[in-house]
Amino acid sequence: MKKVRGKLNRKAVWIPILSLVLVLTATIIYQSNKPLPKGLSFEGEVHTVEDIKFLYDLTFEKDNGRRESDQQIFNRILEAIGEAEDFIVMDMFLFNGFNDGDKEYPDISGKITEELIEQKQSHPNMDITVITDRINSTYGSHDVPEFKKLKKNGINVVYTSLVPLRDSNPIYSAFWRVFLQWFGQGGEGWLPNPLAENAPEVTFRSYLDLMNIKANHRKVFVTEKTGIVTSGNPHNASGFHSNIAFEVKGSILADLVKTEQAVVDYSASGKLTNAKPADSNKTGTVKAQVLTEGKIYKHIIKEINKVRKGETIWLGMFYLADRKVVDALKEAADRGVKVKMILDPNQNAFGSEKIGLPNIPVAAELDKLGHENIKIRWYNTGFEQYHAKIMYVTGKENNMIIAGSANFTKRNLDDLNLETNLKISAPDQSKVMKDVDSYFNKLWNNNGAIYTNNYPSNEKMPVVKYFTYRLQKLTHFTTY
C-alpha cells in the first residue's frame, strides 16, 4: 500500500511539471513561428523614380582633435514637414528627449514636435500620424512629453503593439507570456530608468516587458510629396550619431504608406491618408523598391550571392552578426569580390560603456581568415555611434544599394523586429550612386577628417567576449 501511495505521490508531482514544460515548449514553438500580422514582410513593386537624394549625419574628428558634426537628415525632415499639405506619416523607433544629462544634446525631438504642431495648426484638416515603439514610455511606465503635446494638438500617436509579433527571445518570452503579461506595466514607478537618467522611474513589470527585446525599429517619414527612409531616430541622446537616409518621390510613396497602414491596422484603428498615385517615368534609369522585415533579408542574401569577381561590396553597419550574411560575404570574397566594411566598434550606448558585441567577435572571425579581399575599418567614434545600416554594391553596369533601419542581424532581418529599407538600383554615373560612392571613399580614406581607423589585424579576441557572444547567439538573449 505504501509503494502504491508513493507512486501516486510521484505522479502527482511530475504531472503538473511535465504539463508546464509542454505548455512552455508549445508557446516557444508557436510564438517563434506564428503568422505575422497582415501587411508585414512587404516586398513592393520596383518603381522608376526621377529623384533620389542621399542624406547623412556624420560626427568626426578633425586634425586638431576637435569633434565636429555634419547633420543633414532631420534638418531635411523639418523642411519636409513644412512643405506637406495633405498628410504626414512618421514612424520612428526612438522619439523622446530623455538623456543622461552628461552633454548638451541637440533638441531633435522638441523641434520635430513643434514643427508638427505648427503644421497641424496651419492646416487643421491635415491628417498627421506618429507611429512609435513602446520603448519611449519604457513599456507603459510613464508618459512621453512630446507625445502628450502632439495628442493635445490633434495629432494621432500610435504605439505599436508588440505582443502579436514573433518572439525574438523565445525562452524568456514564453515564460513572460504564460506567467507575467497579465499583470500589465502601469502604476507608480520606483526603479531607475534603464534607458536614461532623467527619464521617469519605471515599474518592475516594465523591466520584465523590456526583456522580451521586441521592437518597431522602423524610421520612416512620408507625405504626399516626399518620403525619407533613414537609420536615424528623432531622439536627443542620439543627436550626434552618424546615420544615413534616402529621400524618394513619386509613385513609391504609396508603398511606404501601405507598410505603415499595416502597423496601424493591427496596433490601433483608423485609415491613413494615402499618397495620390503618381505617374512614374517608365523610361528612367533609377529604380527603387520598398522592403520590410524578412523581405530585406531575402534581397540582401540574393544580391550578395549575385556579386562577381572584380566588383565591390561596401558595408556601413552598426551591427553585423547574422550568420547567413556573414557566410555569404565570405563566399563572395572567395569568388574574388572585394568586401570593404566600416563598422561601429560597439563601445558605447547613450553614455554607457559596451564590450564590443557583436562587431568585435564578428570582425575577429573575418580577419582571422586572412583573406585579401576582406578589409575592415572601425569608425572613429567618440561618445556617439556609427549608426548607419547600408550595403552598396559597385562595379556592375547598375550599382545597387540596400539601406534603412535594419542592422544585419537575425533580430532585424528574420521577421522579428519591424524594419523598413529601400533597395535602389541605378547607373554608376547617376547622382545618387556618385554621392554614395563619395561617402564611402571619404570615410575609408579619411578625406578631410579622421572618420575611420585601421582594423588591428592579429589582435587576439578576449575569451570572455567571445564566449559571451556565442552564449547570447545560442540563447537569443541579446539586442542583436
Image (cartoon, rainbow, N blue to C red):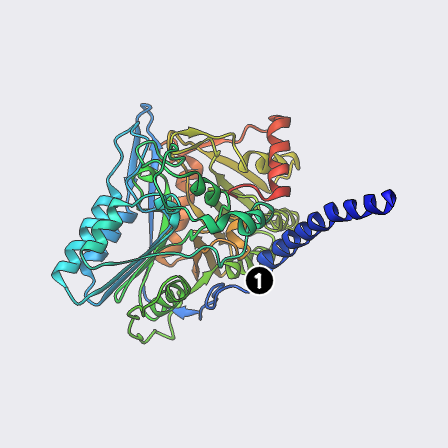
Judge whether 8 appears above or below 193 on screen.
Answer: below
Tell me: residue 63, above or below residue 213.
above
Does residue 53 appear left or right of residue 154 in this picture?
Answer: right
- Tell me residue 141's x, y (percent): 36, 43
Label total for image:
1
**Can you give x and y, in whole percent of width and height, for residue 196 in the image?**
35, 34
Instruction: Specify whether residue 79 is in view.
Output: no
Residue 114 is left or right of residue 342, and the answer is: left
Looking at the picture, how far across and down is residue 311, in whole percent? Answer: 55, 52
Q: Is residue 158 left or right of residue 359?
A: left
Residue 102 coordinates in the image, percent (x, y): 30, 27
The kind of secondary structure element at disc 1 is loop
> Residue at image x 29%, y 36%?
69
Camera-side residue of 217 and 200? 200
Q: Which residue is mark 1?
A: 34
Mark 1: which amino acid?
Lys
Which residue occupies the foreground of this view, 34 or 187?
187
Q: Quadrant of residue 449?
A: top left
At horizontal 65% and vertical 56% (from top left) the residue drawn is 26
The answer to which of 321 and 66 lies nearer the viewer is 321
Q: Residue furthest toward the top?
A: 64
Q: Quadrant of residue 442?
A: top left
Q: Residue at x 36, y 43 (%)?
A: 187
Left or right relative to 123: residue 448: right
The outermost residue toward the front is 1
Residue 2 occupies quadrant: top right
User: Does residue 259 appear anywhere in the picture?
Assistant: yes
